[in-house]
Amino acid sequence: FPETAEDTLISLALVERAGQGDWSPEEMAKVDPDEPVEIGMDVARYGEDKNVIVARRGRLAFAAEEFGCEALGLTGIMAACGRLLAFIERHQIVERLKAIKVDATGLGGGVPDRLRELQLEGRFPRHVKIIDVNAGAAANNSARYVNLITEQWVNLRDRMQQDLAFGPVFANKRVIEQLTRRRYKILSDGRMKLESKEEMKKRGLKSPDWGDALAMAYAEVGAKDRIVNIW
């Protein structure tokens, strides 16, 4: 991977450090064993984009999955929900699951809506909080960040710097590539703005689906089920 540019938010060295370790099931079981599980899910919008699910327990990002955009509209939403539920069952985390944070921009909004329907039908546990995440919404600290996605990525970087975010997911090639290539800029009013997906694509880069899912997985949920990023 290339050396990190000065305007890149997360350095290569930081990602490599977060991905180093003995990630055998026995060793991972020792990391924050009593903490609940939280999931971040980035939903694909176009054919080349990917749906990405990331699960973390406390500091440890222990599991992830990528799958393509099988179809648009309702069919795609149902397929994405099905893959998410299969992921939860395969990793046997439903009893420890605290929250699912889903990118609800555009077509992604149908996924949390469907999960809530399943809860009302008694087909998915009601103790799990379903959180809609609008990346373009105003940041909690709007004096420092232009939007929520910028705040989430800074939160992820800060956790990594303090060894509060690590695990085998960080060793994934796509994660390394996406985290270390997303740029930021400081606007004239002093606020930080993260590079958009569209701007990244203009530079010939793929959508940072893995990075966004990771950032959502580590975003904290407030008392009113709002992403607060305060820890």
Image (cartoon, helix red, strand yellow):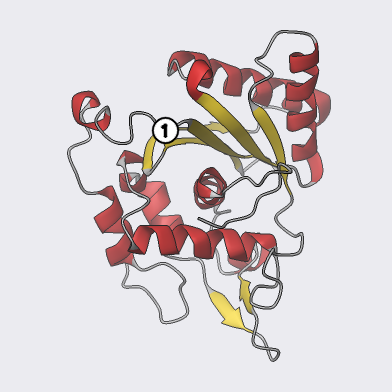
Question: Disc 1 marks which residue?
Answer: 35
Q: Residue at x 37, y 44 (%)?
A: 59
Tally the numbered discs.
1
Q: Residue at x 50, y 55 (%)?
A: 231
Q: Is residue 19 left or right of residue 200?
A: left
Asked if residue 126 shows in the view, the reply is yes
Disc 1 residue type (three-letter): Glu
166 is higher (above) or lower (below) than 7: above
Neighbor class of circle 1 (other Cα within 10 Å; few <14, some 14-19, many 20+) is some
Q: Residue at x 31, y 42 (%)?
A: 167
**Picture coordinates of residue 224 (x, y %)?**
74, 43
Asked if residue 43 shows in the view, the reply is no
Q: Could you say whether the residue bearing mark 1 is in a helix, strand or loop? A: loop
Farthest top residue in view: 122
**Picture coordinates of residue 5 (x, y %)?**
40, 78
Q: Quadrant of the N terminus?
A: bottom left
Location of residue 206 by image quarter: bottom right
Q: Is residue 208 left or right of residue 22?
A: right
Farthest front residue in view: 223
**Picture coordinates of residue 37 (x, y %)?**
48, 31
15 is higher (above) or lower (below) than 172: below
Question: In the image shown, does 163 or 90 lie closer to the viewer?
Answer: 163
Question: In the image shown, does 175 or 131 lie closer to the viewer?
Answer: 131
**Picture coordinates of residue 212 (x, y %)?**
56, 51
Q: Residue at x 65, y 73 (%)?
A: 145
Q: Is residue 8 left or right of residue 169?
A: right
